[in-house]
Amino acid sequence: MAPPSADLIPTAGNNCTGANDVTESAAPIGTPKLAELDPSKLKVTTTKTPRQFQADSSKIEWGKADVSTDHWITAKWSETAGWAAPELKPYGPIDLWPTASCLHYATECFEGMKAYRGFDGSLRIFRPTKNSARMLVSTNRIALPSFSPSALEELIKILLATDGPKWLPERGSFLYIRPTMIGTGGALGVHKPREAMLFIILGQFPVLYGKSLKLLASREDSIRAWPGGFGFAKVGANYGPSLMAQKEAQARGYDQILWLFDKSCQVTEAGASNFFVVWKNKDTGRIELVTAPLDDKVILDGVTRRSVLELAKDRLAVSNGEIQGLDVVERKYTMMDLIDAAKEDRLLEAFAAGTAFFIASVSKIHFRGEDISPKQTNGTYAGILRGWLKAIMFGEEPHEWAVVVPETGFEVDASAAEKEINEMAETLRRMKTNPAFAAALQKVQAEI
């Protein structure tokens, strides 16, 4: 049975009546109706102390420095009241109990999206309905509360409208979007979270698809996902257990792990991205674009993956000039299939596809002492698909997948900011009389 499709927008929360159920049974008669997530109730507080914008994206140290924008959106949920009014407020830390279920029972999920500054100056997001629907699938998988995907999409647009003008000024650039939900209840116990928090942050993000990737195939004792598990959901528990293997791959000079499953070494994903090969079918001689299927819940239903498949079916089915038409195939295949194709000169190219790496060609795969290389290290088909998607994302090709976001920006109340600075300065003057002030100041300066 196929996992819940991002085409299907579940209507409500969580139950245990079936592995793929995403709707809950009717509430008992007399049960108060819980509040829905409602963007119209948004409370807005803009920052008085703007964060520093890094104009040179090449200096962004992703994973080492916090490059989030000035604001974020939060919304709290409880099992007794439902969703509270969401808030747009200055970016800051989370107030969380040490016993919160996200810290103990992995009740956490998220989405990865990007906003694009088009070459025409407009701000766009790419297929946001797919990401919003998929996040609801993820929350249902780990018993987090339900919400309207359209409400999440609207909140994302509001945050982008606010911070986009400052943080995405350059045409042809992008921002990363990270909607997240966590269980926050303050009582230990293995049970459905009684409290939760949704938040949306934006951050600057480096370009990761400039070079071809080298992949290290995973060992039998290291598995990313399995049938009936949660590989189809974007939950934090998918990523933490993979980090040791990822660290090993990088220590050996590879960029990502190529995740295999079962003793047959079925090919699944490349790191956190979907994986594609282009080869000639051994029996028919026709060119095929092949990727692993979704039907056993091992593979994430990636939005870039879906878009690649749809574009290929629509635009590459027949030959066009020097470009041969190809067949789009979703099926299980193994490393032995890849090895055979390479030895028989049928493996034309391979690439990873996802939000972070976009579409990145693969130049080499190492498997049990053997290197496997496609004929093209920078694949023709990967380049064509990358170009088509990039044109849509940045508005060079008008397309329904690219949704324009009208922008408002925000203004800093200079007088309020100056007042806050003066109050802080006066506090520091009073603290200066404390004998421990100099040592404390030196310690803080070392931290920042």
Image (cartoon, rainbow, N blue to C red):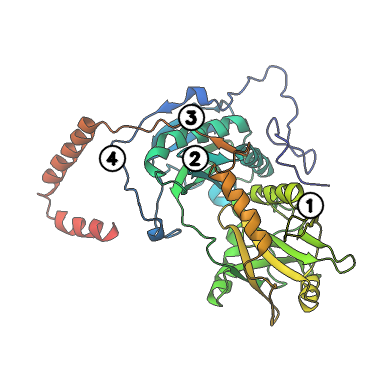
Query: Could you tell me residue 1's position as x and y percent?
Result: 83, 47
Circle 2 residues within 10 Å: few <14, some 14–19, many ≥20: many
Query: Could you tell me residue 332's position as x and y percent?
Result: 81, 61
| Circle nearer the N terminus (3, 4) | 4
CA–CA distance in space, label 3 to label 4? 21 Å
Badges 1 and 3: C-beta atoms under 8 Å apart?
no
Badges 1 and 2: C-beta atoms under 8 Å apart?
no
- Residue 92 lies left or right of residue 15; in this view the side is left
CA–CA distance in space, label 2 to label 4? 20 Å
Residue ID at (86%, 66%): 285
CA–CA distance in space, label 1 to label 2? 39 Å
- Which residue occupies the extreme front position in the image? 321
Residue picked out by circle 2: 200
Say which amino acid is labelled 2: Ile
| Circle nearer the N terminus (2, 3) | 3
Residue ID at (66%, 20%): 31
CA–CA distance in space, label 1 to label 4? 53 Å
Numbered disc 2: secondary structure: strand
Residue picked out by circle 3: 86
Say which amino acid is labelled 4: Thr
Query: Could you tell me residue 227's position as x and y percent?
Result: 78, 56
Numbered disc 3: secondary structure: loop
Residue picked out by circle 4: 49
